Image: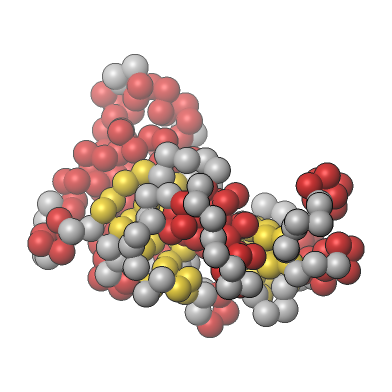
Amino acid sequence: MEAGISELMTDRVAGIGLGVPGLVDIKAGVICNVSNIPAWKDFPVKELLESRFNIPVYIGNDANCFALGEYYFGKGKGYKHLVALALGTGVGAGVIINKQLLIGNGSLAGEFGGIKHLDSSYEEYCSGKFFRNQHHIEAVDLAQQAASGDVSALNIFHEFGIHVGHLIETILYSVGPEAIILGGSLSNAFPYFKSGLKEFLSNFAHQEALAHTLIEVSGNPRIPLLGAGALVLSAEQQEVPAY
């Protein structure tokens, strides 16, 4: 990582923004839990990088970087209240309320994946785990079948969309966002699970509010990277440039 950063360093660099897939102690600059990189647990990345490069370092959860990226540069631009919902190997979300990123006690804000759903949690039913554990197939393989019009594959994605609808209903009631932007690897399969999502939300109790809520796919894989940069600019209260 140091080598990669060194290649980008110039005297114009004001700080380093780093997004990681796990819980982060923002003040201490310590990664609390990264399921995919166990060696990083309790790793003082902020302290070490600031010592190495002598500039401020800001770390954040990757879903929060996704939210900042959408807010400043993506489809969330212009909204005061938004949720960036990442569906992939797990479920993560970044929440912005009144133009401010919501972190919460223990950095738990936006950890909707841990909320109970059916016999488990949204993490189990709204991520790649759903396809693997419930239907014994990887999502990427099922998406290929769905793309060829396989009815069984499309039905499974429809079922997945219903579960995502439950999750979005939870978000609507708990946060009341103006926009929900979908990202993560599974957002690429949105055309296949959109029918289930729409079917479930057609019974949402507050259709007028739903009609004024944007629900779209990000479509820009660079957004979380841009959001990591926005960690620096927003913390330093500098103007975030247009992209």
Instruction: For residue 222, say whether it is visible.
Output: yes
Residue at x 23% of width, y 58% of height: 213
Q: Is residue 232 left or right of residue 57?
A: left
Residue at x 37% of width, y 55% of height: 76
Residue 201, percent from left and from top: 18, 53
> Residue 195 occupies which quadrant of the picture?
top left
Residue 9, placed above or below residue 101: above
Residue 110, percent from left and from top: 45, 67
Residue at x 78% of width, y 47% of height: 8
Q: Residue furthest top?
A: 148
Foreground: 154 or 103?
103
> Residue 33 occupies which quadrant of the picture?
bottom right
Foreground: 157 or 177?
177
Residue 116, placed above or below residue 195: below
Foreground: 23 or 95?
95
Q: Is residue 10 left or right of residue 234?
A: right
Q: Residue furthest bottom?
A: 105
Residue at x 83% of width, y 64% of height: 49
